[in-house]
Image (cartoon, helix red, strand yellow):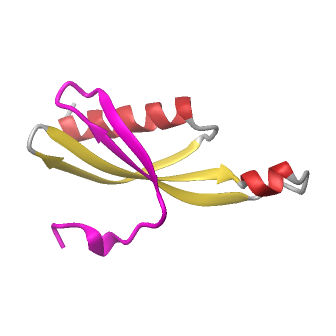
Amino acid sequence: MSKVIEVRNAVIRFLKENIETDDVTVIRVEKTGETWKTVAEVYEEDSFLKSMNLPPKKVRLFYSVVVDSKIEIISFTRLTSYDDSESENN
């Protein structure tokens, strides 16, 4: 299996285990030195609506996840937005 696929699968598994969602899509994988930088698109229930006991609605959020050379997650952050043009490869 290619390393990119291993990284993608590790990120999906990590986010599904740590965020209450089943809908995760990795939309970017980039190797930088010894680490892999990824961005994942995640659909989660809107926490505000949930807290107000209103009907649930899914919202799209983006997470940045950094993976080391041993395919261990070393950091993750929810992004305020994602613009594909931010990629250094474009």
What residue is rendered at 20% in x and 24% in y? 70
Q: Nearer the viewer, residue 48 or 71?
A: 48
Q: Nearer the viewer, residue 4 or 71?
A: 71
What residue is rendered at 45% in x and 31% in y? 13
What residue is rendered at 41% in x and 67% in y? 82
What residue is rendered at 46% in x and 67% in y? 81
Whether residue 38 is situated above or below residue 74 in the rendered picture: below
Q: Residue furthest right?
A: 53
Q: Is residue 35 left or right of residue 46?
A: left
In which quadrant will I find the C terminus?
Answer: bottom left
Q: Which residues are magenta?
A: 63-90
In which quadrant will I find the N terminus?
Answer: top left
Whether residue 27 is situated above or below residue 11 in the rendered picture: below
In percent of width and height, residue 5 lies at: 28, 38
User: Quadrant of the rendered structure where residue 36 is?
Assistant: top left
User: Quadrant of the rendered structure where residue 6 is?
Assistant: top left
In percent of width and height, residue 84 lies at: 33, 70
Can residue 9 be seen at all in this image of the molecule? no
Can residue 45 be seen at all in this image of the molecule? yes
Q: Is residue 47 left or right of residue 34?
A: right
Whether residue 28 is situated above or below residue 3 in the rendered picture: below
Q: Is residue 58 left or right of residue 39?
A: right
In percent of width and height, residue 74 lies at: 31, 32
Judge whether residue 67 is colored magenta: yes
In percent of width and height, residue 89 lies at: 15, 67
